[in-house]
Image (cartoon, rainbow, N blue to C red):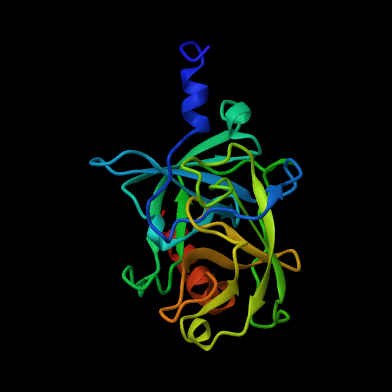
């Protein structure tokens, strides 16, 4: 069985980034299949390293949003997935034409951790593939939100989940996060390794981009950080317009 199905097993046990910045859904549960049609899995690779994975979400037929620390030399996005081990052959698979990390992205501090990816061909919308609206400064301040991804489901796992997982998170008031254009949540439930770039969804809109998890120097619970999309709406609009004009 292991010989004849080695490709399927390989896909089920893809290893994740070792970075603290690359997320996992811990303390969550399996999502209803295809209930989040904007979600996508991004395969990224550099010439000198093995393939790695991030999450992302569809903005329109041409663009995907993810985290800037997911930058790589080449990308391929998988759309319309729930169970990667079963649906990888039927999912839409589109290479990325160009990546646009934020101009002020600071990799050491993971600040302005947002990136747009322009697809090489247009995404085909269906019941399982749809974009998500982005929050603006005029939208209500969020409190209870959801995250989702194919990352690790507990902190001792070495492999990603084949099925899309989701969890509820409660945002907290954190002055440091506010200064870094981010939302934050606290506790064991949240992201870690494998879910970077996925959306923080509140009121049915994408309010944030899964960025990083850290523990305060003074100790205490994990703090999960999400790049604050309302603060980047002008950059998103400008970047998309320039990219479409140049193409």
> Viewed as shown, does residue 180 lie left or right of 140?
left
Which residue corresponds to the image point at 53% horizontal and 88% vertical from the top-left?
175
For the view shown, which residue lies furthest in the left direction? 48
> Viewed as shown, does residue 171 lie left or right of 155?
right
Q: How many marks?
A: 0
> Which quarter of the figure has residue 107?
bottom left
> Which quarter of the figure has residue 33?
top right
Which residue corresponds to the image point at 46% horizontal and 66% vertical from the top-left?
114
Up-down relation of residue 108 to residue 56 (above or below): below
Percent coordinates x, y for residue 216 in the rendering: 45, 77
> Viewed as shown, does residue 81 lie left or right of 156?
right
Up-down relation of residue 140 to residue 83 (above or below): below
Percent coordinates x, y for residue 35 in the rendering: 75, 47
Percent coordinates x, y for residue 223 in the rendering: 53, 72
Taking depth in this image into account, of 119 and 55 the one nearest to the observer is: 55
Taking depth in this image into account, of 244 and 5 the one nearest to the observer is: 5
Percent coordinates x, y for residue 165 in the rendering: 65, 48
Up-down relation of residue 230 to residue 164 (above or below): below
Which residue corresponds to the image point at 61% horizontal and 85% vertical from the top-left?
173
> Which quarter of the figure has residue 103?
bottom left
Taking depth in this image into account, of 6 and 218 the one nearest to the observer is: 218
């Amino acid at each position: 069985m292991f010989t004849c199905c080695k490709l399927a097993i390989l896909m089920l046990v893809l290893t994740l980034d070792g970075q603290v910045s690359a997320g996992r859904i811990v303390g969550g549960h399996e999502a209803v299949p295809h209930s989040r049609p904007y979600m996508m899995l991004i395969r990224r690779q550099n010439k000198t390293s093995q393939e790695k994975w991030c999450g992302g979400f569809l903005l329109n037929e041409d663009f995907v949003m993810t985290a800037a620390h997911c930058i790589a030399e080449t990308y391929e996005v998988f759309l319309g997935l729930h169970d990667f081990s079963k649906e990888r052959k039927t999912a839409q698979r589109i290479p990325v034409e160009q990546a646009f990390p934020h101009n002020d992205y600071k990799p050491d501090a993971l600040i302005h951790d947002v990136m747009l990816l322009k697809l090489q061909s247009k995404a085909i919308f269906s019941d399982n593939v749809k974009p998500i609206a982005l929050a603006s400064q005029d939208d209500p301040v969020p409190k209870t939100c959801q995250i989702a991804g194919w990352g690790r489901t507990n902190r001792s796992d070495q492999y990603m989940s084949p099925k899309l997982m989701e969890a509820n998170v409660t945002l907290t008031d954190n002055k440091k996060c506010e200064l870094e254009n981010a939302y934050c949540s606290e506790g064991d439930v949240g992201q870690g390794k494998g879910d970077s770039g996925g959306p923080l969804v509140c009121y049915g809109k994408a309010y944030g981009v899964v960025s990083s998890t850290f523990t305060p120097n003074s100790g205490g619970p994990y703090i999960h950080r999400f790049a604050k999309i309302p603060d980047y709406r002008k950059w998103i609009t400008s970047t998309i317009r320039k990219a479409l004009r140049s193409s």
